[in-house]
Amino acid sequence: MYPWLASVWHSWLQSFAQQRLAHAWLLSGPLGLGKLELARQMAQMLLCQHPSATGACGLCHSCTLLAHGNHPDLQVLGEQNEKSLGVDLVRDLIGKLNGSAQLGGAKVMIMVRAERMTESAANALLKSLEEPSGDTVLLLVSHQSSRLLPTIRSRCVQQACPLPSEALSLEWLASALPATRNVSA
């Protein structure tokens, strides 16, 4: 978890612990902040069979499937960098979400760069946002949330992901990059 997203993660963990999670979340903020990684961690926690107060267990069957990228109850839309997310893609996704969960728990959808939805795709998604089926959670990730229809934004918990301070950025970079050594020739 990126340190600048820690407050967002802890807030989400509290909602999870209190069983007060909304069915739709909009993670917004500038490109490159780690919003997709945050959405993936949220999805893993929702799908984990033995979650703890700090996150997914990482060991159960569900976590193993997620680690190998083939969990049947997680749908990810928009990772292929499509120019736009059309109505057929969204309807196909909604069809998968309307079925029963394969592992008997939650069903989770992550939509990457949700602002790329066409107007008809957004309208098709509205019904699922208004009347989600079962334990379905929709996680929309956007770096231009103002381009989403107001009706989409209004049906999601809007979570702004903050920019890191310069000091935090430098501290994280120093820990993330390998130390370089001065070698004399």
Image: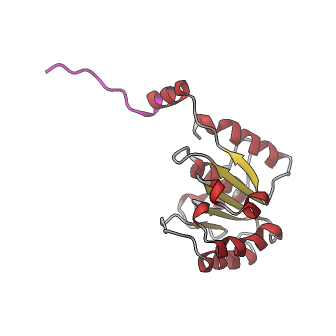
- Disc tally is 0
What's the colour scheme? secondary structure
Q: Residue shown at 50%/26% (left/top)?
A: 171
From the viewer's perspective, is residue 23 above or below residue 185?
below
In this view, 99 is above or below 1: below
Q: Position of residue 181 (x, y in %)?
A: 29, 23
Queried whether the magenta region covers residue 133, the answer comes back as no
- Left or right of 65? Residue 183 is left
Instruction: State the residue in front, 145 or 97.
Output: 145
Judge left or right: residue 130 versus residue 124: right
Q: Position of residue 185 (x, y in %)?
A: 13, 21
Residue name at image x 68 percent, y 70 percent: 122
Instruction: Give the farthest residue toward the left.
Output: 185
The residue at the point 61 percent across, 46 percent down is 29
Residue interval drawn in magenta: 175-185
Q: Could you tell me residue 63's position as x and y percent?
A: 63, 57
Q: Residue 183 colored magenta?
A: yes
Give me the residue at 79% from left, 49% from top: 16
Q: What is the quadrant of residue 123 in the picture?
A: bottom right
Q: In the rendering, at what x and y percent does residue 116 appear?
A: 57, 65
Q: Main secondary structure of the magenta part?
A: loop
Q: Which quarter of the figure has residue 152?
A: bottom right
Q: Is residue 159 above or below residue 65?
A: above
The reply to whether residue 102 is in sight is no
Q: Is residue 143 left or right of residue 10?
A: left
